[in-house]
Amino acid sequence: MTTDTDSLALRYFVTYTGVKLPLKLLDEMPETALNNRNTYFRGWFDADERVVKIEKAVYGAVELRHTYRYHPNGRVAHAVIELADDQTTTMTFDEEGTLTSSETVEF
C-alpha cells in the first residue's frame, strides 16, 4: 500500500509502545537529533493527528514499515506491516476494531 506523504507531517521518535494498532510512537525528538542515533522511528501524521505511516530506521535502512487507513470513527480500517525480511502482513478491521481478515505473504 502506498501512502502519499506530501500532505502529512513527518516527526521523529525514539521508540514505540503497544501491541494494538496503530503503534503509539514515544519520545519525540527533533530532526537534528538523528545524527546521534543509530535507530529511530519516523511517523507521518494526517491533519487529525492520526499516524498513517511508521518506519523504523536502523543505520539508515528501513527495517519495519506500518501503513494505516482509518474508518470515519477513527479506528484502524486497514494495516499493512512490512518487515525487512520481505514479509508483508495485510490486516482489515471492522468499525468496532475487530480483525476481519489477515494475510501474510513472503517474497
Image (cartoon, rainbow, N blue to C red):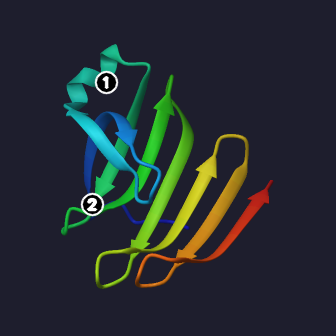
Q: From the image, tell me which residue sits under label 2.
A: 8
Residue at x-position 19% and y-position 31%: 30
Please state the horizontal and vertical placement of residue 65, each as a whole percent of the image: 52, 49
Q: Is residue 21 above or below residue 31?
A: below
Q: Amino acid at mark 2?
A: Leu
Residue at x-position 42% and y-position 50%: 54
Q: Amino acid at mark 1?
A: Leu
**Looking at the image, which is closer to me, 38 or 89?**
89
Q: How many marks?
A: 2
Please state the horizontal and vertical placement of residue 91, each as a whole percent of the image: 59, 70
Q: Is residue 26 left or right of residue 58?
A: left
Residue at x-position 72% and y-position 51%: 87
**Looking at the image, which is closer to me, 94 or 63?**
94
Query: Element under label 2?
Result: loop
Q: From the image, tell me which residue sits under label 1.
A: 34
Query: Element under label 1?
Result: helix
Q: Quadrant of residue 36?
A: top left
Q: Quadrant of the N terminus?
A: bottom right
